[in-house]
Image (cartoon, rainbow, N blue to C red):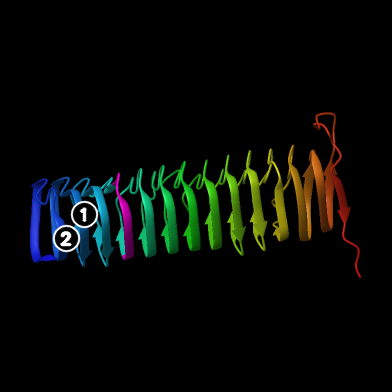
Amino acid sequence: MKQISNAEFGGERPLFASHDLRLENVTVRAGESAIKECSNIEAVNCRFEGNYPFWHVHGFSIRNCYFAVGGRSALWYSDHLEMSDTVIDAPKMFREMHDIKLENVTINDADEIFWRCSNIRISNLRLHDGTYPFMFSDNIYVDGLESDSKYVFQYVKNVEIHNARITTKDAFWEVENVTIYDSELNGEYLGWHSRNLRLVNCHISGEQPLCYAHDLVLENCTFDPSCDRAFEYSTLKADIRGAITNIKNPMSGSIVADSIGSVTIDENIKAPADCRISVRREG
């Protein structure tokens, strides 16, 4: 493998069509498409300042690197990426990619990241700011996520999440086959229009959660007092620990909680309108 160390590049396509290349302590200055149409690339302790540095790259690793604001849209149309211990200040990362592995990565402008990506495995990711991370992506496994980005995980399929703290609104809309374990979900309008969304040992806060959901499952979950008008027009099986403030017009299934503040069933409830709602009996 060829190695380039302690160097700087800029301008248009300085390393175009490179293969079997290791970059160490390299800085990519202003310009475009520095590492395009490449394969088997390693980047260690590098800095990327120009636009679109990694497009159409097949098989690459990025370790201890930094993407400056100018390095926007840096990773598109590529596959088999391993990234670790990296900080990203640029928006619109990860587009139309597959086979991605991230560990200990911080993204400070998570605007439109991970769009139409597949086969993503994540360990310890921090997302800050931006909108619509993970839109239209599938086959995602996450262990360790902290995010305050808006509208996360919309239109995703086949997702498993552990140990997350997500503060947002309109999260997990139109999702299919998503399971979330041991996590904190803070924000309004969680999980609307979802299919096969399962929450296990989760804490939920925010107004009107989990409405229009199909085949929703909650196991050993808790709710903040802010959660009112929950489960409207949803089909579900919910085991709630502690209290829930208000339940409104669930369609079918069952809900059991330690205590329920109020239940609203009005003339707008949809058929079959046979959801069983009960308070758990001690002993």
Give the prevailing secondary structure in the magenta stretch: strand
Height in image: 234 above or below 219?
Answer: above
* Residue plotted at (50% across, 58% down): 141
Q: Residue at x 20, y 46 (%)?
A: 51
Front residue of this view, candidates 171 and 36: 36
In the shown orientation, is residue 269 left or right of residue 12?
right
Tell me: 75 left or right of 233: left
Residue found at x 85% / y 29%:
267
Does residue 81 show up magenta in the picture?
yes
**In the rendered structure, does residue 189 fall within the stretch colored magenta?**
no
Residue 96: quadrant of the picture: top left
* Crowding at mark 2 (Cα within 10 Å: few <14, some 14-19, many 20+): some
Classify residue 272 by image quadrant: top right
Residue highlighted by disc 2: 20
- Expressed as whole percent of the image width and height from the top left, the position of residue 82 reads 33, 61
Residue 193, numbered circle: none
Pointer 2 with pointer 1, Cβ within 8 A: yes
Along the polypeptide, which appears first: circle 2 or circle 1? 2
Which secondary structure, mark 2? Answer: strand
The residue identified by callout 1 is 39
Under tag 1, what secondary structure?
strand
Span shown in magenta = 76-85
Q: Amino acid at mark 2?
A: Asp
Q: Is residue 173 visible?
A: no
Specify the amino acid type for callout 1.
Ser
Q: Residue at x 38, y 60 (%)?
A: 101
The image shows residue 281 at horizontal and vertical percentages of 91, 63
Q: Nearer the viewer, residue 226 or 97?
A: 97
